[in-house]
C-alpha cells in the first residue's frame, strides 16, 4: 500500500506542470482540499478538464513527460 499525497500537494504538482494551458482542475481532489469534513487524502486522482483538443494533447504530453500516469 502506498502513501497518498495530501490533495493540495497533488493539485499543486499537476497545476505546476500545466501552467499556461487552458485547463481546469476539479473533482474529488479539489473537494478534499477545500472541505474540512473530508479527509485530505480522500481522492484517487486529480481530474483535469481541457478547454480544447489541442490543450488536451499538450496537457497529456506534459504529464507523461513528467512521469505521470494517465
Image (cartoon, rainbow, N blue to C red):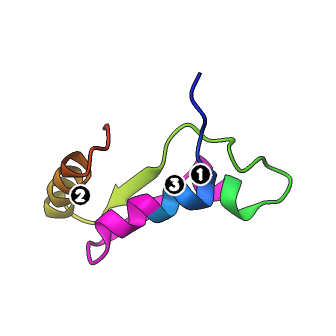
Residue at the spot 31% in from the left edge and 44% down from the top edge:
68
Residue drawn at point x = 30 percent, y = 66 percent: 18
The residue tagged with tag 1: helix, strand or loop?
helix
Pick the quarter of the image with the C terminus. Answer: top left
Would you name the residue on which mark 2 appears?
A: 59
Q: CA distance from mark 3 to mark 2?
A: 16 Å
Pointer 1 with pointer 3, Cβ within 8 A: yes
Which residue does the numbered mark 1 point to in the structure image? Answer: 29
Instruction: Tell me: residue 62, above or below residue 21.
Output: above
Task: Please provide the residue range marked out in magenta.
Answer: 13-31
| Real-space Cα separation, disc 2 to disc 1, in angstroms | 18 Å
Q: Residue at x 48, y 65 (%)?
A: 12
Residue placed most toward the observer, 13 or 49: 13
Residue 2 in which image quadrant: top right
The answer to whether residue 43 is visible is yes
Query: Which circle, 3 or 2, is nearer the viewer?
Result: 3
Q: Earlier in the sequence, mark 3 or mark 2?
A: 3
Quadrant housing the N terminus: top right
36 is within the stretch colored magenta:
no
- The foreground one among 12 and 51 is 12
Q: Which residue is mark 3?
A: 10
- Mark 2 and mark 1 lie on one chain; the one further toward the N terminus is 1
As helix, strand or loop, the secondary structure at mark 3 comes to helix
Amino acid at each position: 500500500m502506498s502513501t497518498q499525497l495530501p490533495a493540495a500537494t497533488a493539485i499543486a504538482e499537476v497545476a505546476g506542470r500545466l501552467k499556461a494551458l487552458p485547463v481546469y482542475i476539479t473533482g474529488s481532489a479539489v473537494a478534499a482540499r477545500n472541505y474540512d469534513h473530508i479527509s485530505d487524502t480522500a481522492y484517487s486522482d486529480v481530474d483535469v478538464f481541457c478547454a480544447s483538443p489541442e490543450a488536451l494533447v499538450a496537457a497529456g504530453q506534459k504529464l507523461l513527460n513528467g512521469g505521470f500516469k494517465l
